[in-house]
Image (spheres, rainbow, N blue to C red):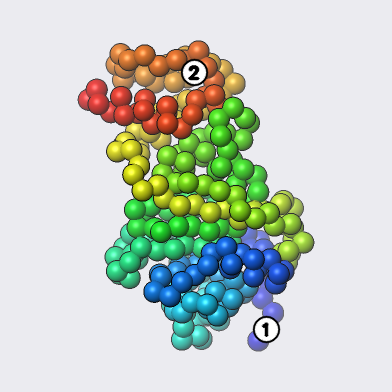
Amino acid sequence: MPQHIPRKRFGQHFLTDTVLIDAIVDLIDPQPGETLVEIGPGLGAMTLPLLERHKPLTVIELDRDLAARLRKRDDVEVIESDVLKVDFKALAATKGAKLRVVGNLPYNISTPILFHLLEAVDDVVDQHFMLQKEVVDRMAAGPGGKDYGRLSVMLQWRYDIESVLDVPPEAFDPPPRVDSAIVRMQPLKMPPAVNPTLLGELVASAFSQRRKLLRHSLGHWLTERGYAGHFNLQRRAEEVPVDEFVALALEVQGQK
Protein backbone atom coordinates (compact mmCIF):
# COMPACT_ATOMS: atom_id res chain seq x y z
CA MET A 1 0.00 0.00 0.00
CA PRO A 2 1.48 3.45 -0.93
CA GLN A 3 2.65 5.70 1.87
CA HIS A 4 0.18 8.38 2.91
CA ILE A 5 1.62 11.91 2.90
CA PRO A 6 0.14 14.00 5.74
CA ARG A 7 -2.01 16.83 4.41
CA LYS A 8 -1.30 20.19 6.00
CA ARG A 9 -4.76 21.58 5.16
CA PHE A 10 -6.34 18.80 7.25
CA GLY A 11 -3.95 19.44 10.14
CA GLN A 12 -2.72 15.85 9.97
CA HIS A 13 -0.21 14.66 12.60
CA PHE A 14 -0.21 10.88 12.98
CA LEU A 15 0.38 9.27 16.37
CA THR A 16 3.16 6.68 16.16
CA ASP A 17 4.29 5.98 19.78
CA THR A 18 2.86 2.52 20.52
CA VAL A 19 3.38 2.73 24.29
CA LEU A 20 1.43 5.98 24.41
CA ILE A 21 -1.26 4.58 22.12
CA ASP A 22 -1.78 1.63 24.49
CA ALA A 23 -1.98 4.03 27.44
CA ILE A 24 -4.63 6.10 25.64
CA VAL A 25 -6.72 3.03 24.79
CA ASP A 26 -6.44 1.96 28.45
CA LEU A 27 -7.80 5.36 29.47
CA ILE A 28 -10.73 5.00 27.06
CA ASP A 29 -11.32 1.43 28.28
CA PRO A 30 -13.93 0.38 25.67
CA GLN A 31 -16.46 -2.18 26.86
CA PRO A 32 -18.71 -4.65 24.96
CA GLY A 33 -22.04 -3.24 23.85
CA GLU A 34 -20.89 0.39 23.76
CA THR A 35 -21.19 2.60 20.69
CA LEU A 36 -17.73 3.94 19.95
CA VAL A 37 -17.12 6.75 17.43
CA GLU A 38 -13.64 7.88 16.43
CA ILE A 39 -13.06 11.28 14.86
CA GLY A 40 -10.12 11.48 12.46
CA PRO A 41 -8.77 7.91 12.55
CA GLY A 42 -5.97 8.80 10.15
CA LEU A 43 -3.72 5.80 9.51
CA GLY A 44 -5.44 3.79 12.24
CA ALA A 45 -2.90 4.23 15.05
CA MET A 46 -5.70 4.27 17.64
CA THR A 47 -8.32 2.60 15.46
CA LEU A 48 -6.58 -0.78 15.28
CA PRO A 49 -5.85 -1.07 19.04
CA LEU A 50 -9.46 -0.02 19.73
CA LEU A 51 -10.71 -2.72 17.36
CA GLU A 52 -8.70 -5.32 19.27
CA ARG A 53 -10.94 -4.56 22.27
CA HIS A 54 -14.16 -3.37 20.68
CA LYS A 55 -16.01 -4.16 17.44
CA PRO A 56 -17.58 -2.65 15.43
CA LEU A 57 -16.26 0.90 15.34
CA THR A 58 -17.69 3.97 13.59
CA VAL A 59 -15.12 6.43 12.25
CA ILE A 60 -15.45 9.93 10.80
CA GLU A 61 -12.77 10.74 8.22
CA LEU A 62 -12.60 13.66 5.78
CA ASP A 63 -9.55 12.49 3.82
CA ARG A 64 -10.94 10.35 0.98
CA ASP A 65 -7.76 8.25 0.66
CA LEU A 66 -7.76 7.36 4.37
CA ALA A 67 -11.52 6.70 4.28
CA ALA A 68 -11.01 4.30 1.37
CA ARG A 69 -8.37 2.34 3.32
CA LEU A 70 -10.68 1.94 6.29
CA ARG A 71 -13.64 0.85 4.13
CA LYS A 72 -11.73 -2.32 3.26
CA ARG A 73 -12.40 -3.57 6.81
CA ASP A 74 -15.72 -5.19 7.65
CA ASP A 75 -15.60 -4.16 11.31
CA VAL A 76 -15.47 -0.40 10.61
CA GLU A 77 -18.31 1.87 9.51
CA VAL A 78 -16.84 4.88 7.71
CA ILE A 79 -18.58 8.25 7.63
CA GLU A 80 -16.64 10.24 5.02
CA SER A 81 -17.40 13.78 6.06
CA ASP A 82 -16.24 16.97 7.67
CA VAL A 83 -16.91 16.30 11.37
CA LEU A 84 -18.57 19.72 11.69
CA LYS A 85 -21.28 18.49 9.29
CA VAL A 86 -21.99 15.25 11.17
CA ASP A 87 -25.27 15.21 13.12
CA PHE A 88 -24.23 13.37 16.29
CA LYS A 89 -27.77 13.42 17.72
CA ALA A 90 -29.03 11.66 14.59
CA LEU A 91 -26.10 9.23 14.72
CA ALA A 92 -26.98 8.31 18.32
CA ALA A 93 -30.62 7.85 17.31
CA THR A 94 -29.58 5.57 14.44
CA LYS A 95 -27.41 3.50 16.77
CA GLY A 96 -30.10 3.42 19.45
CA ALA A 97 -27.51 4.29 22.09
CA LYS A 98 -25.48 7.13 23.53
CA LEU A 99 -22.05 7.60 21.98
CA ARG A 100 -18.54 7.33 23.36
CA VAL A 101 -16.55 9.75 21.19
CA VAL A 102 -12.75 9.59 20.84
CA GLY A 103 -10.14 11.00 18.54
CA ASN A 104 -6.99 12.92 17.73
CA LEU A 105 -8.71 16.17 16.74
CA PRO A 106 -7.24 18.43 14.04
CA TYR A 107 -5.68 21.22 16.10
CA ASN A 108 -6.65 23.92 13.62
CA ILE A 109 -10.40 23.34 14.17
CA SER A 110 -10.49 21.71 17.61
CA THR A 111 -12.55 24.46 19.30
CA PRO A 112 -15.31 24.46 16.63
CA ILE A 113 -15.49 20.65 16.96
CA LEU A 114 -15.89 20.90 20.75
CA PHE A 115 -18.72 23.43 20.38
CA HIS A 116 -20.35 21.30 17.66
CA LEU A 117 -20.34 18.27 19.96
CA LEU A 118 -21.75 20.40 22.79
CA GLU A 119 -25.01 20.51 20.80
CA ALA A 120 -25.28 16.70 21.15
CA VAL A 121 -24.08 16.43 24.77
CA ASP A 122 -27.27 14.66 25.89
CA ASP A 123 -26.47 11.83 23.46
CA VAL A 124 -22.90 11.28 24.66
CA VAL A 125 -21.54 9.01 27.43
CA ASP A 126 -18.07 10.58 27.39
CA GLN A 127 -15.38 12.04 25.13
CA HIS A 128 -11.62 11.37 25.07
CA PHE A 129 -9.65 13.67 22.78
CA MET A 130 -6.06 14.38 21.90
CA LEU A 131 -5.68 18.14 21.72
CA GLN A 132 -3.08 20.85 21.93
CA LYS A 133 -2.08 20.97 25.62
CA GLU A 134 -2.72 24.69 25.72
CA VAL A 135 -6.34 24.07 24.68
CA VAL A 136 -6.79 21.31 27.28
CA ASP A 137 -5.40 23.65 29.95
CA ARG A 138 -7.97 26.27 28.94
CA MET A 139 -10.81 23.72 28.93
CA ALA A 140 -10.02 22.49 32.44
CA ALA A 141 -8.97 25.82 33.99
CA GLY A 142 -10.55 27.20 37.15
CA PRO A 143 -11.21 30.93 37.72
CA GLY A 144 -8.41 33.29 38.64
CA GLY A 145 -5.81 32.52 35.97
CA LYS A 146 -4.99 33.43 32.39
CA ASP A 147 -6.13 30.02 31.06
CA TYR A 148 -9.68 30.52 32.35
CA GLY A 149 -11.93 32.00 29.69
CA ARG A 150 -14.94 31.58 27.45
CA LEU A 151 -13.96 28.03 26.46
CA SER A 152 -13.61 27.00 30.14
CA VAL A 153 -17.07 28.31 31.08
CA MET A 154 -18.96 27.10 28.02
CA LEU A 155 -17.65 23.54 28.39
CA GLN A 156 -17.60 23.23 32.18
CA TRP A 157 -21.26 24.12 32.59
CA ARG A 158 -22.05 20.85 30.77
CA TYR A 159 -19.01 18.59 31.35
CA ASP A 160 -16.67 17.41 34.05
CA ILE A 161 -13.29 17.99 32.37
CA GLU A 162 -9.97 16.41 33.27
CA SER A 163 -6.55 16.41 31.62
CA VAL A 164 -5.47 12.77 31.94
CA LEU A 165 -2.24 12.36 29.94
CA ASP A 166 0.45 14.61 28.45
CA VAL A 167 1.77 13.69 24.99
CA PRO A 168 5.11 15.06 23.65
CA PRO A 169 5.60 16.19 20.01
CA GLU A 170 7.94 13.26 19.25
CA ALA A 171 5.01 10.84 19.63
CA PHE A 172 3.75 12.07 16.21
CA ASP A 173 4.82 11.97 12.58
CA PRO A 174 5.31 14.75 11.59
CA PRO A 175 5.89 16.19 15.09
CA PRO A 176 3.64 19.19 15.80
CA ARG A 177 5.26 22.35 17.15
CA VAL A 178 3.24 22.12 20.36
CA ASP A 179 2.75 19.76 23.28
CA SER A 180 -0.44 17.71 23.34
CA ALA A 181 -2.64 16.17 26.00
CA ILE A 182 -5.54 13.75 26.37
CA VAL A 183 -8.68 15.27 27.86
CA ARG A 184 -11.60 13.33 29.36
CA MET A 185 -15.02 15.00 29.14
CA GLN A 186 -17.96 13.50 31.01
CA PRO A 187 -21.39 15.18 30.65
CA LEU A 188 -22.85 16.36 33.95
CA LYS A 189 -25.91 14.32 34.94
CA MET A 190 -28.06 17.24 36.18
CA PRO A 191 -27.01 20.39 34.27
CA PRO A 192 -28.83 23.70 34.96
CA ALA A 193 -31.77 24.41 32.64
CA VAL A 194 -30.16 27.48 31.12
CA ASN A 195 -30.58 28.62 27.52
CA PRO A 196 -27.21 27.80 25.89
CA THR A 197 -27.48 30.67 23.39
CA LEU A 198 -28.19 33.20 26.14
CA LEU A 199 -25.32 31.85 28.28
CA GLY A 200 -23.03 31.97 25.25
CA GLU A 201 -23.87 35.63 24.59
CA LEU A 202 -23.40 36.52 28.27
CA VAL A 203 -20.02 34.79 28.54
CA ALA A 204 -18.79 36.20 25.21
CA SER A 205 -19.72 39.69 26.42
CA ALA A 206 -17.99 39.15 29.78
CA PHE A 207 -14.70 38.04 28.20
CA SER A 208 -14.79 40.55 25.31
CA GLN A 209 -12.63 42.94 27.38
CA ARG A 210 -11.09 40.52 29.85
CA ARG A 211 -8.53 43.03 31.21
CA LYS A 212 -11.26 45.47 32.21
CA LEU A 213 -13.83 45.25 34.99
CA LEU A 214 -17.12 43.61 34.04
CA ARG A 215 -19.03 46.90 34.33
CA HIS A 216 -17.31 47.96 31.08
CA SER A 217 -18.40 44.88 29.14
CA LEU A 218 -21.02 42.68 30.76
CA GLY A 219 -22.57 45.70 32.48
CA HIS A 220 -23.69 47.15 29.15
CA TRP A 221 -25.05 43.77 28.01
CA LEU A 222 -27.10 43.44 31.21
CA THR A 223 -28.42 47.02 30.97
CA GLU A 224 -29.62 46.39 27.40
CA ARG A 225 -31.65 43.44 28.72
CA GLY A 226 -33.18 45.39 31.58
CA TYR A 227 -31.41 43.36 34.26
CA ALA A 228 -32.49 44.60 37.68
CA GLY A 229 -30.66 42.11 39.91
CA HIS A 230 -27.45 42.39 41.90
CA PHE A 231 -24.30 41.00 40.32
CA ASN A 232 -20.82 42.15 41.32
CA LEU A 233 -19.46 43.87 38.21
CA GLN A 234 -16.40 45.21 40.06
CA ARG A 235 -14.49 42.09 38.99
CA ARG A 236 -12.79 40.85 35.86
CA ALA A 237 -14.43 38.01 33.94
CA GLU A 238 -11.62 35.60 34.84
CA GLU A 239 -12.52 35.96 38.55
CA VAL A 240 -16.12 34.72 38.14
CA PRO A 241 -16.75 30.97 38.68
CA VAL A 242 -18.78 28.96 36.16
CA ASP A 243 -21.74 28.54 38.51
CA GLU A 244 -22.05 32.33 38.95
CA PHE A 245 -22.16 32.88 35.18
CA VAL A 246 -24.85 30.18 34.91
CA ALA A 247 -26.86 31.62 37.83
CA LEU A 248 -26.76 35.08 36.21
CA ALA A 249 -27.92 33.66 32.87
CA LEU A 250 -30.82 31.94 34.66
CA GLU A 251 -31.76 35.27 36.30
CA VAL A 252 -31.75 37.10 32.95
CA GLN A 253 -33.67 34.21 31.39
CA GLY A 254 -36.31 34.41 34.16
CA GLN A 255 -36.92 38.10 33.54
CA LYS A 256 -38.43 37.47 30.12
- In the picture, the disc for residue 50 is none
Examine the rendered structure and indicate whether residue 218 appears above or below residue 28.
above
Q: Considering depth in this image, is 224 or 152 the residue closer to the camera?
A: 152
Q: Which quarter of the rendered picture does the N terminus lie within? A: bottom right
Examine the rendered structure and indicate whether residue 88 appears above or below residue 41.
above
The residue that appears at 47% across and 46% down in the rendered structure is 160
Q: Secondary structure at mark 1?
A: loop
- In the picture, the disc for residue 2 is 1
Q: What amino acid is at disc 1?
A: Pro
Return the disc, 2 or 1, that comes first in the chain's sequence: 1
Q: Is residue 116 visible?
A: no
Residue hosting label 2 = 214
Examine the rendered structure and indicate whether residue 65 appears above or below residue 201.
below
Disc count in the image? 2
The residue that appears at 56% across and 42% down in the rendered structure is 140
Residue 40: x %, y % from top left: 54, 66
The residue that appears at 24% across and 22% down in the rendered structure is 255
Marks 2 and 1, how far apart at CA: 56 Å
The residue that appears at 74% across and 53% down in the rendered structure is 177
Q: Secondary structure at mark 2?
A: helix
Instruction: Sort mark 2 into few (<14), some (14-19) or many (20+) by Cα contacts within 10 Å.
Output: many
Left or right of residue 180, residue 222 in this image: left
- Judged from this view, the residue extending furthest toward the left is 256
Q: Considering depth in this image, is 18 or 114 the residue closer to the camera?
A: 18
Q: Is residue 200 visible?
A: yes
Quadrant location of residue 165?
A: bottom right
Examine the rendered structure and indicate whether residue 176 appears above or below residue 48.
above
Residue 155: x %, y % from top left: 47, 43
Left or right of residue 90, residue 6 in this image: right
Left or right of residue 171, residue 206 in this image: left
Residue 211: x %, y % from top left: 59, 21
